[in-house]
Structures are given as C-alpha cells and as structure tokens.
Image (cartoon, grey):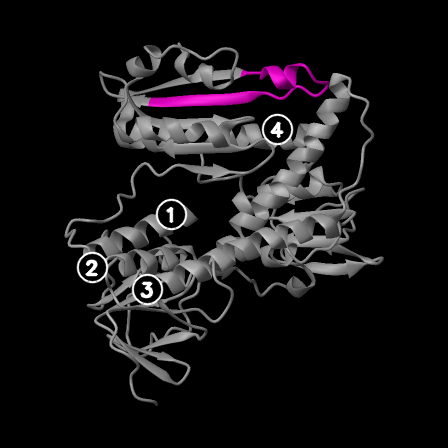
Amino acid sequence: MSQPLRALDYIVIGGGSGGLASALRAARHGARVALLEPNALGGTCVNLGCVPKKAMWYAAQTAHELQRAREYGFDIRSGVLDWSRFLARRQDYIERIQDSYRTRLKESGIEVIPARGQLVEPGRVDAQGRVLEAPHVLVATGGRPRRLTLPGFEKGMLSDDFFDLRSCPRSVAVVGGGYIGVELAGVLHALGARVDLYARSTLLSHYDEELGQALADSMRADGIGVHLHALVPGLRELDGGLVLDGIEHSMAAPYERVLWAIGRVPNSRCIGLENVPLSLDAEGHVQTDDWQNTSVRGVYAIGDVTGRDELTPVAIAAGRKLSDRLFGGQDDAHLEYANIPSVVFAHPPLGMVGLTEAQARQRHGDNVRVYRACFTPMQSALSDHPQRSLMKLVCSGKDDRVIGVHLFGPGSDEMLQGFAVAVKMGARKSDFDATVAIHPTSAEELVLMQ
C-alpha cells in the first residue's frame, strides 16, 4: 500500500445524502475531510430513489389532473407521456444536483476520492490501494434492493431498474406492499399501465392499519388490482409474457413486466468488516447507539446501512448532528429518533408522525383516545371520481396529548410537516381545537375533529 495522504480529521465512506451532509458540516467546523464515493454523488436518493421517483410521481399527478380537468369541463384531449422528453428533464435536474454537490465540496476543501473504501483497522481506510488515516471514520454506505433466490427471480426487475424504463409497459405485476411497491404501482398505473399489486400481508404494514386499508380501497377504485396475503414463490415465462407462480390467474396474466419491491438490504458486506468487526444485526445493519457510535471506537454509522428510519432527511440530520458533536464542540448533539414524520407518495399520498393507534394502545392502554375525520375533498367531489380522505389524531392522557397524526388524501404530503412540529412540541387536542380553521381546505379537518 502507498503512504498515507495528507493528515485528515474525518473519513466519510459513502457519498449519499447522509455522508455528504456530515462531510460538509464537518468541513464547516474546520475539519479536514476526505469523502469516498465510487459512483455518482447523491447516492440512492438523488440517483435511484427520492428524486427520480418524485419526478415520476409529478408526471403521474399531472396525468390525474388532466383527467380531472376534462371532468370539470375543460376541452383537453387525453395524451400519452413522451417518456424520452420527460426523462431528459429528469436527468437534467439530477445533474444539476450533482453539480451543486461538486461545487460545495470543492469550496469546502473536501477531498473527494472516486473509490470504494474499506476499513483496514480503526482509523485506517483503504481507498483501492491508497491509505487514508483519521481519528474519525463514518460508514454511510446506504442500501440496495433485496434479491431473492426464487425460481425466475432474474426475469423481473428491481426498483433500480424502474428508472431505466424508456416507455410505459402495457401491464405490470408489482410484488410487495411496502412504500416502494405502492408508489411505483401508482405511477405506472397513472401513466397507462395495467397494474396488479401482490402483497404478502397488508399494504404499508408499518403505518396505521386504517390508512393501509384506505389506500388499498382507493387503489382498487382507481383500477389497480390489489391482492393481499399473496405469496409469490417464483416467476416464469408463458405466451410471451411473465406469470407469477402460486397465484390464481384469470385475465390478469401474463404480464409484460414484473417489479420486485420486496424491501432493501444494507451495503455492509464490502467495507472491511473482517478487519474491523462492527456489530451487525441479523439483516446485516451496522448497529449504533443514539450518538451514531458503533461497537468500534472512532467508527460511526448513519443512514440506511444502520436500518434506523431509512429516510433521507434522517440520514442528513444524523450526519450533521454527528459532525456537530465531533468537530463543533456540541457534546450532546445527536438526533432524536422519536416523532419523525414520513410520507408515502401514493396516489393520493399518505403520511404519519408519532405512534399508530395499535402502538399507542399497546403503550398507553385505555388512556388512548382516537379522533377521525373521513370526508370527500372539494376538488375530488367536483369530479366524476370522488375520492375519500381519512385523518386521525391519536391522543393520550388526561390532557389529550397528541401522540400520533395520520393523514390520507390529496395534500397530505404538504400539510403533515406543520403538524409534525406540533407533535414534537407536545401539542394537545385542545390546542388543535383552539386553532381557527382555514376554509375550505382539507387541513381544516384536523382542527375540527370531535
């Protein structure tokens, strides 16, 4: 191996959102930082996740709005998305983000090394033959789509492959009832595909049960086949298409495409764990405490590789807090993982912050009270395809402290953020009641529940 490069304070393995945020914050505090990333900057979120997915969601939303516009009375002809034109716009946007990262990294004096990093020992990292040394090393290597050893698995596509599509398939089977499955099923359906979704249990099992059921009902009403408690043991070709084994088929199959959306696994296998034995869970996630410390002194981990709230803003916040603690003199800086809001960009979207009703009842028993509002939003009621929204407040204690907010319906993604602040501050139901409603909106239902 070569001699060590310039003296460093911090080595960041992984140039995704969390690693970038931590590196930039550390450099702001004056630390000398090296960032190792063999692929495109931005990681999953920018290149194969949040950003391109949300772009496709906007395209799908536009398709829905065109339909509603015709129902309202606008003289608009239906059209098919020009995928190549839209994908060019999507890629231009991604490249602008990457350019911004490169500029900020250069201005911050961070050394970017396009290599895969492997831990040699605490404080030493091999960057494909180049040795880096620093007292602090961060593992932020993210995750990847799960693969299974099922017959014919390779005939289907993973979520990463979705972004390589250059046209909309005529028919798609989506296997998986998590957020990736329901999001991509909704996008493909809105853009013209015939879609069936197969989930091994219910939809969005980590969300409030009522929201998952409301989404399933809404998807069915929209024309998506939703099949719950469906196990798919394999995949095979038939009559020029793809057929799912173990599923009763009528008019649904064969499919042009099958999308496996069966979860994600951590990228913890190629980071030198044989040299630095970090503690892992059964899935291979790097175990950390609430300060992002691993079992090895001087080695830290954030983001999807840890399996804790696998959301981009969580990785960013954890990475910044860690750098504040290590280099900014803020000894108590760490991310509080309670009451983190999350949204699923289905059609329509849904989101939550705090505890589900089931979690609340398990934790607080008979002290839990639940308030609901089920209604048809005005914009939907004016169309030929009215769609119901559902909102829930989960409260606890004599003062009705709001410990869970659950939203399903148009605008849920945008309105949740402010209510997440209220939950974080310990708001009570009476605080919601005392807030004057904004009429006519869907959000007003949250302060009018009885």
Q: CA distance from mark 3 to mark 1?
A: 16 Å
In the rendering, at what x and y percent does residue 9 appear?
23, 69
From this viewpoint, which residue is outermost toward the right?
A: 239
Q: Nearer the viewer, mark 4 or mark 1?
A: 1
Instruction: Say left or right for 153 vs 365.
Output: right
Q: Residues within 10 Å of mark 3 (few under 14, many from 20)?
A: some
Q: Where does label 3 land, which residue?
A: 280
Q: Residues within 10 Å of mark 2 (few under 14, many from 20)?
A: some
Q: Where does label 2 land, which residue?
A: 327
* Residue that appears at 71% across and 24% down: 68
> Of the residues under marks 2 and 1, which one precedes in the sequence?
1
Q: How many marks?
A: 4
In the rendering, at what x and y percent does residue 147 appear?
55, 62
Question: Which numbered circle lies on residue 309?
Answer: 1
> Of the residues under marks 3 and 2, which one precedes in the sequence?
3
Q: Amino acid at mark 4?
A: Asp
Q: Where does label 4 land, which residue?
A: 217
> Of the residues under marks 4 and 1, which one precedes in the sequence?
4
Q: CA distance from mark 4 to mark 1?
A: 27 Å
Q: Secondary structure at mark 2?
A: helix
Q: Nearer the viewer, mark 3 or mark 1?
A: 1
